[in-house]
């Protein structure tokens, strides 16, 4: 008997189209003798439970639109392959403790998020937020003035808070600029730091005080919620840069707004405590703050990277080979 006889994919039509364009969808359909695709936009949790009971699949392929799983799962379901990032809205820790194997997109989209971090860093250094506002005002002849303090990234010191896949890709992207890089993360060992050519910061205070550019990439867990305080933000030297493409609530946002209003540092934000960002939010009117609406990654053209990564894991599971980006109970606890 084959290791896998049934695969249930629970995706919206848009998710299927964006993550699994041809030939990926055809490859997915060929993986199991019994393949079923269900439109998750038409399902609530109860309807998904009925679908699972009817199909009793070996594998469930899910995405953002897949409803959460109930505590009790169909008897054959052993593997959930999640196309995107955080699995916390789909499964519980108890599912993992009882042996359910779960993977997500792992580092497949890390390079696009790192690219967005680099975009914000460069935008801050070149004072792009100011010019994006000023030069687009009708009737205003905006040109060089006292705010023309464009700076280069070359040889500037960079501090990275967090050292997961995105941070590691950012280190690679920064190589052409010859930036000395310091990082801080609980799992950043001396061996890992040496492998990536970064220094380990002694503390968050040392990270923020010792670098011209800070990139926030720590996961959002209870221990990191609000960990970037006003005291830390004020350690960034005047003319410095603070960029957050990780999780908004890692930062005390009210404190960040107070610092931003003083205009002594430039700030680039892709994530916020409240999303979508309210129209009245104070960051919107500040010329030294660059804003993007949580679009760091994946970009729409790179969704298939996650689809291809999922297919790689599905093949590995079917062939009884090790999976990548496995969510263990410990990783579950440390993930956003």
Image: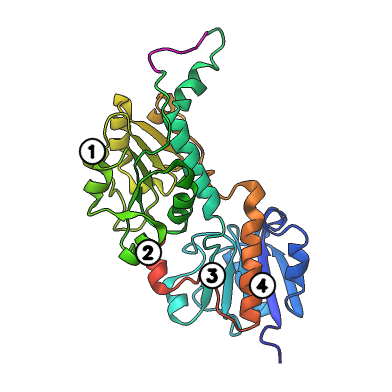
For label 1, the residue is 235
Q: Is the magenta stretch mostly helix, strand or loop?
A: loop
Q: Is residue 262 visible?
A: yes
* Disc 4 versus disc 3: nearer the observer: 3
Q: Is mark 2 on a helix, strand or loop?
A: helix
Alpha-carbon neighbours of circle 3 within 10 Å: few (<14), some, or many (≥20)? many
Residue 51 shows which numbered tag?
4
- Location of the C terminus by quadrant is bottom left
Task: Determine whether, in the image, residue 19 is placed left or right of residue 85.
Answer: right
The span from disc 2 to disc 4 (Cα, nearest Å) is: 44 Å
**Depicted 293 relative to depicted 301: above or below:** above
Q: Which is more N-terminal, label 3 or label 4?
A: 4
Report x, y in % for residue 132. Answer: 51, 23
For label 3, the residue is 103
Q: Which is more N-terminal, label 1 or label 4?
A: 4
Q: What element carries label 3?
A: strand
Alpha-carbon neighbours of circle 1 within 10 Å: few (<14), some, or many (≥20)? some
Q: Do tag 3 and tag 2 residues touch (Cβ < 8 Å)?
A: no
Seen from the viewer's position, the closer of residues 154 and 137 is: 154
Residue at 45% from the left image edge and 27% from the top image edge: 126
For label 2, the residue is 192
* In the image, farthest residue toward the bottom: 1
The span from disc 3 to disc 2 (Cα, nearest Å) is: 23 Å
Residue at 60% from the left image edge and 62% from the top image edge: 83
Task: Determine whether, in the image, residue 52 is placed left or right of residue 125.
Answer: right
The span from disc 1 to disc 3 (Cα, nearest Å) is: 38 Å
Q: What element carries label 1?
A: loop
Where does the magenta region start and end? 141-147
The mark total stands at: 4
């Amino acid at each position: 008997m084959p290791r896998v006889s049934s695969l249930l994919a629970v995706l919206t039509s848009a998710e299927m189209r964006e993550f699994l364009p041809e030939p990926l969808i055809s490859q997915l359909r060929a993986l199991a003798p019994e393949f079923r695709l269900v439109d998750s936009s038409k399902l609530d949790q109860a309807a998904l439970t009925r679908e699972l009971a009817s199909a009793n699949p070996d594998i469930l392929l899910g995405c953002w639109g897949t409803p959460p799983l109930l505590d009790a799962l169909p008897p054959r379901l052993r593997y959930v392959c999640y196309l995107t990032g955080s699995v916390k809205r789909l499964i519980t820790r108890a599912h993992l403790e009882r042996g359910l194997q779960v993977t997500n997109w792992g580092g497949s989209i890390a390079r696009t998020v790192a690219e967005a971090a680099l975009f914000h860093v460069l935008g801050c250094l070149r004072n792009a937020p100011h010019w994006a506002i000023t030069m687009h005002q009708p009737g205003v002849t905006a040109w060089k003035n006292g705010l023309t303090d464009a700076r280069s990234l070359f040889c500037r010191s960079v501090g990275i808070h967090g050292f997961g896949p995105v941070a590691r890709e950012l280190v690679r992207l920064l190589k052409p600029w010859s930036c000395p890089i310091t990082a801080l993360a609980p799992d950043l060992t001396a061996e890992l730091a040496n492998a990536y050519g970064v220094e380990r910061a002694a503390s968050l205070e040392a990270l923020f005080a010792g670098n011209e550019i800070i990139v926030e990439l720590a996961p959002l867990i209870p221990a990191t919620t609000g960990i970037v305080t006003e005291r830390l933000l004020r350690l960034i030297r005047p003319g410095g840069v603070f960029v957050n493409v990780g999780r908004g609530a890692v930062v005390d946002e009210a404190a960040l707004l107070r610092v931003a209003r003083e205009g002594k540092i430039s700030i680039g934000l892709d994530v916020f405590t409240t999303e979508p960002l309210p129209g009245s939010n104070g960051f919107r009117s500040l010329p030294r703050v660059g804003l993007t609406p949580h679009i760091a990654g994946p970009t729409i053209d790179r969704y298939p990277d996650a689809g291809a990564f999922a297919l790689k894991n599905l093949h590995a599971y079917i062939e009884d080979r090790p999976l990548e980006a496995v969510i263990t109970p410990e990783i579950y606890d440390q993930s956003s």
